Amino acid sequence: MKLHIAFKILAILLVFFTLSAGLLVDVPALNILNETIRNLFFHVTSWFAMVFLFIASFTYSIRYLRTGSPADDLRARVFVETGMIFGAAGLVTGMLWANFTWGSYWVPDPKLNGAAIALLAYLAYGVLRNSLQDSIQRAKVSAVYNVFAFVMMVLFIFILPRMTDSLHPGNGGNPAFSSYDLDDNMRLVFYPAIIGWILLGLWMTEIRIRIANLKKT
Amino acid sequence: MKAWISTLTLMLLFLSSFAQSAEMADQMRADGKIYVVVGVLILIFAVLFTYLIFLDMRLRKVEKENEQA
């Protein structure tokens, strides 16, 4: 996988745009949320980046099962690893945000528990990989498990929280963004922010894949 | 050399006395100094990205050496 230099430059520009515009743009003044509404540009976009990287990993796992190419197995593995970094960032930033808006670092909420279970499912992917010695067997078993982990992630983060009541915005029957009062100003930062963090994740993944390829030769 | 430094210091003192007496358009002190936070974030990420770019370049070098070998 080669990421064109234009995308790397775009990643830098968009992240800088997010950092400055994210703090300076006019946001709706809401009770309880106050200025923390700006976390939308950092916390929510972390999860978007994670989901994107996990989708990429899922795709490469499916491709591995069709082609049997070790390169696809490697990509699936590295995409899970970088996705986990963004997932961990999303979880930790969410805990900090929750403490100052809901009054506790962790509340027994379907969205929060679901996110934790989803991350544990992907953690198990790494454990599974390390427990298998034979490289072909490891690639096959972990590709199948990765498909399962992806389904679990979608189920626990996107479906189950919407079927019950949840404190977290975008759940309990709510459409995803209306409760944020996302106005045009915020959209102007939110969408570039998503692209920026995703591109940064792709760049990190690319570097790790290149290192792994060097190690092989 | 010493005269140089003292001249420079005097010039800076002279300039700073202007800054104190007159109201200047100082963005960094406006809006609860949020621009300072933005500046800090930009600096940190500038360092991180510089590191990432150097890492990328060094990796490319090793890749090229590897191809030749």
Image: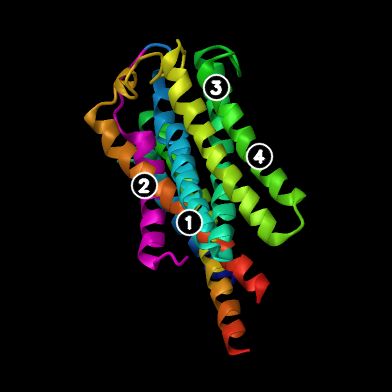
- On the image, the x and y values in percent for residue A214 come to 63, 73
Q: Marks 2 and 3: CB-CB under 8 Å?
A: no
Point 55% across, 62% down: residue: A68
Q: Which of the labelled discs sits on residue A112, or is there none? A: 3
Mark with earlier residue (4, 2): 4
The local crowd at label 2, few if under 14, some if 14 to 19, many if 20 or more residues have their Cα within 10 Å, is: some
Q: Chain of mark 3?
A: A
Q: Nearer the viewer, mark 1 or mark 3?
A: 1
What x and y, as percent, mark residue A89? 56, 37
Q: Secondary structure at mark 3?
A: helix
Nearest to viewer (mark 4 / mark 3): 4
Mark 4 falls on what kind of element? helix
Upstream in sequence: badge 1 or badge 2? 1
Identify the main secondary structure in magenta.
helix
Q: Amino acid at mark 4?
A: Leu
Residue beneath label 1, please? A63
In the image, which residues are magenta? A1-30
Upstream in the sequence, badge 4 or badge 3? 3
The residue at 45%/45% (across/down) is A55
**C-alpha separation, residue under disc 1 versus residue under disc 4:** 21 Å
